[in-house]
Image (tube, rainbow, N blue to C red):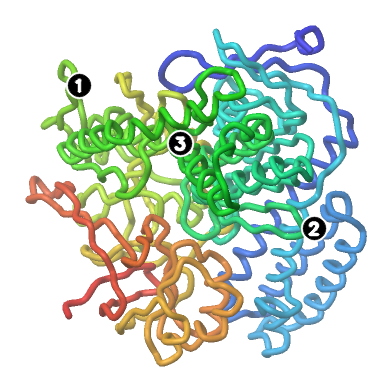
């Protein structure tokens, strides 16, 4: 492999910090293989664009909307013929022909033709886009030898993989970083990567990552078959399902096959998607290793339920640590390692209290209550936010302590913000939704987004809203936790946001400036503002309440259409289409979080005093929305406000 790939070496550097990843390129992949992956990539991108375009037009579809959908469907059919199969391509072409007929007039579409465009449950362009997307992600594709080698500088691992896209440019993409993290758990038999997507496969296991997956569509998927029929094989398979569940996946078992998905039930940013990809592969690799270790670990269990409880405890430990808690390599390694892990429960609680004290002192969110403390969860909920705070200058090191830096100015670079090209402004809604309020400058609301782009490198972006509510100006910088901040020009920043899946394939309408105390999300369906009681129950929503939900399940579509408004946290095009066709406003709040039995939690920014026409965010408070609270929803601006009771 080394000799084959000796031709080209790319050193992939993060914008700030040391070199980490190396890629060696060999011969190009066979043309048939490259063509299949190119078709798959194009199909997924085109399906997402079609879904977004139909969702934007669903409130008042016209002839030109049907004409554009027909053109996109024809392109989808071409990609599907290669990536999925002739039958799928034929269905898409037939629907495209029907839409061409519907587009004969430039005026509003009659109901039957509008259904051809956007009916979420019937034969429509919207449903066809989703169907083709799902079928494409289930397709295995042709096998091919790797044509690239990914390794870590000075590290002990290397990953042969199929490079679908050209890897020109001396920097690590988020996908390659995700591949590197997964490969540390166990080497796959096959790996492939494009700019925004990755695939890992071994016998009976496949895991995929899609950084560009739209809200409501899983960003990470896993499919696993049982390794064998023996009782220890089945126990290992049960562990896999439980470990994925503990890592935040939706898990289903059908005909002995486990399918798991992440990112459809709630909002998930690029870093969380990439980390979950590595966690899914790590859980699958651990489950394949388990049968030889379970004989000792389960030796003293007397009933099936006792064995399940033992496996569930192991799954929680894996989700916390990101690996199996092993003590050595012998047959008793798992039993002894798990006993040691349980014995340290008190020490982990002490560590949680220490984390919370540091995080609170910096104005950061506390370690999630009820979550097991381990290396994986520490990385996600302590190291990651601490590194980000250091990178943006909010925190500083003082000896062995972390302190809030009184010199930090959240609006420091707002004055250097440059104009965003007009064709990008309406496509930055995802980046805006994943940003947090930074303050107000000259009456304009400023949002700050920060995303990891390397092992110790972050892209920090200030988005200044224009009078129409869309980002008008942008200031960006790259920085590491040890400093070294440097400015990033607008073109480079936009390119990086696109790689992170934070740029929409279609332009959104201007939403208008949000109210100062409103939570700003993604406008899904225009209308409002409307006020009313919120409910988390779709049936109660039928009586004219505002339906608040993670996403729309199939049984929720009909009652949601009778609600006064819809608020989702990962609804995306499905909620947009349902709400627009029902003529009710809808908003998506991807940064909100759901508490078990508690409600919907949101962070509300608190502005400090005005200084020279600026008001920077001085802190935040956690607000919990509960059943029966009165809220105001503006579907045009994409905002939600909590009203006095």
Q: For residue 349, what is the image quadrant?
A: top left
- In the image, 336 versus 589, the foreground residue is 336
Pick the quarter of the image with the N terminus.
Answer: top right
Question: Mark 3 sits on what residue?
Answer: 493
**Residue 328, image x, y percentages:** 54, 17
In this image, 358 relative to 555: left or right? left
Left or right: where 577 falls relative to 539: right
Q: Which residue corresponds to the image point at 30% horizontal and 63% vertical from the top-left?
A: 519
Residue occupying image coordinates x 43% and y 38%: 320
- Position of residue 188 relative to residue 625, above or below, is above
In the displayed structure image, the side of residue 386 where residue 232 appears, left or right: right
Distance of label 2 from label 1 (alpha carbons): 54 Å
**Residue designated by label 1:** 397
Question: Is tag 2's residue or tag 1's residue first in the polypeptide sequence?
Answer: 2
Q: Which residue is depicted at the point 62% across and 35% down?
A: 294
Q: Earlier in the sequence, mark 3 or mark 1?
A: 1
Secondary-structure class at tag 2: helix
Question: Secondary structure beneath disc 3?
Answer: helix
Distance between mark 2 and mark 3 Cα atoms: 30 Å
Image spot of residue 377 (x, y percent) = 40, 37
User: As displayed, is residue 495 above or below residue 634?
Assistant: above
- Answer left or right for 198 relative to 395: right
Examine the rendered structure and indicate whether residue 283 appears above or below residue 145: below
Please state which of the two labelled residues, at mark 2 or mark 1, is closer to the viewer.
Answer: 1
Circle 1 residues within 10 Å: few <14, some 14–19, many ≥20: few
Query: Which residue position holds label 2?
Result: 75
**Residue 59 showing in the rendered view:** no
- Residue 171 position, x and y percent, is 55, 23
């Amino acid at each position: 492999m080394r000799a084959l790939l000796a031709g080209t070496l790319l050193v992939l550097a993060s914008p700030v910090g040391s070199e980490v990843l190396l890629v060696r390129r060999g011969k190009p992949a066979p043309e048939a293989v490259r063509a299949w992956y190119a078709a798959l990539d194009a199909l997924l991108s085109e399906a997402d664009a079609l879904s977004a375009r139909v969702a934007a037009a669903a409130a008042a579809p016209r002839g030109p909307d049907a004409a554009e959908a027909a053109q996109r469907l024809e392109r989808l059919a071409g990609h599907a013929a290669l990536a999925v199969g002739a039958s799928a391509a034929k269905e898409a072409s037939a629907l495209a022909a029907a839409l061409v007929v519907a587009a004969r007039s430039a005026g509003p579409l009659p109901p039957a033709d509008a259904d051809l465009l956007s009916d979420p449950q019937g034969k429509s362009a919207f449903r066809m886009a989703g169907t083709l997307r799902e079928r494409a992600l289930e397709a295995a594709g042709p096998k091919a030898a790797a044509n690239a080698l990914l390794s870590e500088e000075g590290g002990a691992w290397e990953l042969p993989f199929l490079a679908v896209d050209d890897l020109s440019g001396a920097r690590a993409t988020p996908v390659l970083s995700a591949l590197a993290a997964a490969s540390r758990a166990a080497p796959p038999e096959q790996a492939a990567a494009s700019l925004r997507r990755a695939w890992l496969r071994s016998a009976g296991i496949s895991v995929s990552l899609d950084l560009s997956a739209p809200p409501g569509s899983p960003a990470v998927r896993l499919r696993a078959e049982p390794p064998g029929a023996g009782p220890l094989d089945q126990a290992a398979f049960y562990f896999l399902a439980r470990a994925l569940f503990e890592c935040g996946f939706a898990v289903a078992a059908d005909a002995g096959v486990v399918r798991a998905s992440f990112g459809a039930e709630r909002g998930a940013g690029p870093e969380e998607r990439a980390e979950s990809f590595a966690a899914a592969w790590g859980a699958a690799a651990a489950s394949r290793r388990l049968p030889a270790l379970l004989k000792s670990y389960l030796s003293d269990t007397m009933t099936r339920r006792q064995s399940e409880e033992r496996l569930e405890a192991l799954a929680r430990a894996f989700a916390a640590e990101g690996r199996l808690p092993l003590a050595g390599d012998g047959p008793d390694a798992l039993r002894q390692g798990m006993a040691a892990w349980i014995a340290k429960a008190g020490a982990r609680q002490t560590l949680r209290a220490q984390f919370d004290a540091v995080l609170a002192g910096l104005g950061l969110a506390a370690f999630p209550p009820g979550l097991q403390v381990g290396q994986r969860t520490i990385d996600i909920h302590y190291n990651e936010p601490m590194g980000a705070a250091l990178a943006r200058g909010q925190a500083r090191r003082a000896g062995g302590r972390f302190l809030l830096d009184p010199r930090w100015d959240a609006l420091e670079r707002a004055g250097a913000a440059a104009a965003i090209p007009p064709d990008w402004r309406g496509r930055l809604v995802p980046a805006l939704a994943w940003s947090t309020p930074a303050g107000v400058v000259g009456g304009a609301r400023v949002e700050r987004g920060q995303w990891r782009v390397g092992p110790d490198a972050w892209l920090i972006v200030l988005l200044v809203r224009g009078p129409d509510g869309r980002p008008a100006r942008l200031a960006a910088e790259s920085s590491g936790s040890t400093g070294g901040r440097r400015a990033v020009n607008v073109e480079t920043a936009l390119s990086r946001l696109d790689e992170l899946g934070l740029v929409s394939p279609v332009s959104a309408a201007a939403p208008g400036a949000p109210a100062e105390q409103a939570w700003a999300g993604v406008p899904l369906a225009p209308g409002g503002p409307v006020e009313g009681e919120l409910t988390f129950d779709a049936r109660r929503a039928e009586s004219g309440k505002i339906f608040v939900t993670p996403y729309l399940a199939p049984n929720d579509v009909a009652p949601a259409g009778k609600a006064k408004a819809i608020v989702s946290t990962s609804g995306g095009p499905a909620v947009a289409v349902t709400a627009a066709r029902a003529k009710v406003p809808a908003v998506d709040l991807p940064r909100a979080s759901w508490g078990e039995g508690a409600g919907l939690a949101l962070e509300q920014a608190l502005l400090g005093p005005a200084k020279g026409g600026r008001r920077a965010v001085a802190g935040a408070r956690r607000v919990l929305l509960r059943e029966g609270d009165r809220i105001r929803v503006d579907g045009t601006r994409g905002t939600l406000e909590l009203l006095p009771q």
